[in-house]
Image: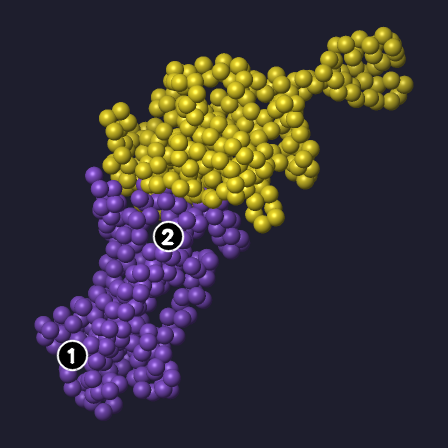
Chain colours: A yellow, B purple
Amino acid sequence: MSAETETQRSATGPAAGRAADERVVEVRDLRMSYGSHRVLDGVDLDVQRGEVVCLLGPNGAGKTTTIEVLEGFRVRSAGHVQVLGVDPAEADEDWRARVGVVLQSWRDHARWTPRRLLEHLGGFYQPYSTPDRHRPYEVDALLATVGLEERADQKINTLSGGQRRRLDVAVGIVGRPELLFLDEPTAGFDPHARRDFHDLVHRLSDLEGTSILLTTHDLAEAERLADRILILAGGRIVADGSAEALARQVAGDAEVRWARAGERFVHATPDATRFVRSLLTQYGDEVAELEVRRANLEDTYLAMVQQFETGDVDRAASAFGEVVR
Amino acid sequence: MNTTLHAVRLGVRRGWTEFLLSLRSPQDQGFYVFVGLGALGYLWLNRDSEVEGTSLLLPSVALPSILGALLAFGVVIGPAYALAMEREDGTLLRLKAVPHGIRAYVTGQLLLHSLGLLPMLAVIMVPSVFLFDDVTPQDASGWLTFAWVITLGMLATLPLGMILGSVVPSTQKVGSWGMLPVLVVTAISGIFFPIQALWGWVQAVAQVLPVYWIGLGLRSAFLPDAAAALELGGSWRTGQTVLVLGAWAVVGWIVTPVVLRRMARRQSGSVVEQARQNALQWVR
């Protein structure tokens, strides 16, 4: 883990106070194939206790597959996976009680009310209550946390999309999990709902010390939420670090554009200053329309997504090549 | 605390909640009214016809048979639809994500569909008492027979519904995988016309399946002993009824948990998402 990661983490209260190396998720060389189609090709990732980690990648990169393996909902082809010290493929119901999963459902329990559903599902965690982790979450407090107090006694099928998703989150945390998985939690949110949701994630992490692993294809969201971002592409983790660390690392290359004698040129270089100086020394006044642009994280990420979507998976994976090595 | 017992208790509460919600739902009320009107209409139109070779009126003979068919239909198609739908909409996955949730889910389903029989029986039996003569069991032992045939019949057929709901690829397929076979089986099981009217091999098939025996058992509960003369072999064959239904029940309750476990293992967020996409296509 890089020094930057540590700096970033110290910003969030309880996370920083905990043991530096207590892994709640440990994945080594995770592989997944469907027939001849290889989805995951050696994924390595860790989540420390109290950390918020974002798995970022274009649609179809294997984020959902990865998270479902960790949730114990999908059997992997190969690799070593430990979640809260247990292999999820062989985990029992007691392990379930420690893990929260935020599901994207669409019309289940339509006739129930949020309060009734949370009371029912919370009941399953009651035998797992301990003095320092009282389970389940008190329903009224939970409804307030996700902002559904006013809808608590309305039928679930009358909730809006955003309200439903907040209910999904409430269901995911009703057992006060040590570790929470969220797969594309804000898909279909309007900007306001999205911001509310981000606040909720921060609160969970700060107040409850919950470790959180979430997936998204939206870089801005990952930057806002995560202590650490993992970029998944081509079936591998191609970058791993805080948003700042990743930005610094991709900033290595700058793009220099200029025109000379009616022709346009582009050159990528790690040292733009030196290149421009030699350019001007050589050609002087002939150089026109000079432009130096530092690649930022967003540029690099978007370029990678585009390569991925046009089917150039390998090049997409190497967009962050320098970052990893 | 025993977590298994705790989950079963939550499942019972879940089943009861769902039952109450179903009673309050216009959709389910509509279904009960529809079934009730259909059955009563059929009986009413034939209220004066006598059953050949007896002094019995058709409603007396047909009512227990119809109840038998509805029982089988209700506890096979009902759970099959519920399970197929709740696999697709994520209900099952939600419960899979909580400790011991699947156990509670299955408990809830069993209770819900068992209780669901009560309104079904009520919408037909209660009006029948007022509309027709001789349509209830003759004495206390008749009521007792009614009770055990209903119970055993349910135990024999409910697992079939759970299995069907677990293996059917999508909710839309419940019609062709479930409804059709059940209708065919009902048609050959002596519900609407005596089984003797059919070819020998069809009679043999019908007597392997549970619906015929549920109908026979209910007729033995509702009709005077003399009416046994109308049946195959001129007897109610009570012992065989217990044996056949019992066998279906035992096999069903052994196989069902295995099938349910396999089905539950396949559930994941992406399976639900896929089902959602398919459903959207269907609507379009």
Farthest-out residue, right:
A261
Q: Which residue is mark 1?
A: B134
Q: Which residue is mark 2?
A: B261
Residue A96 in picture, x, y percent from top left: 35, 38
Chain under disc 2: B
- The residue lying at 46 percent from left, 17 percent from top is A9
- Mark 1, secondary structure of its residue: loop
- Image quadrant for the N terminus of chain B? top left
- Number of numbered discs: 2
- The residue lying at 31 percent from left, 63 percent from top is B252
Chain under disc 1: B
Residue B239 in picture, x, y percent from top left: 20, 77
Which of A296/B57 is in front? A296
Q: Which amino acid lies under the numbered mark 1 shown in the image of this protein? A: Asp
Asked if residue B27 shows in the view, the reply is: no
First-in-chain label (2 vs 1): 1
| Residue A203 vertical placement versus B86 (above, below) | above
Question: Nearer the observer, disc 2 or disc 1?
Answer: 2
- The residue lying at 28 percent from left, 65 percent from top is B250
- Mark 2, secondary structure of its residue: helix
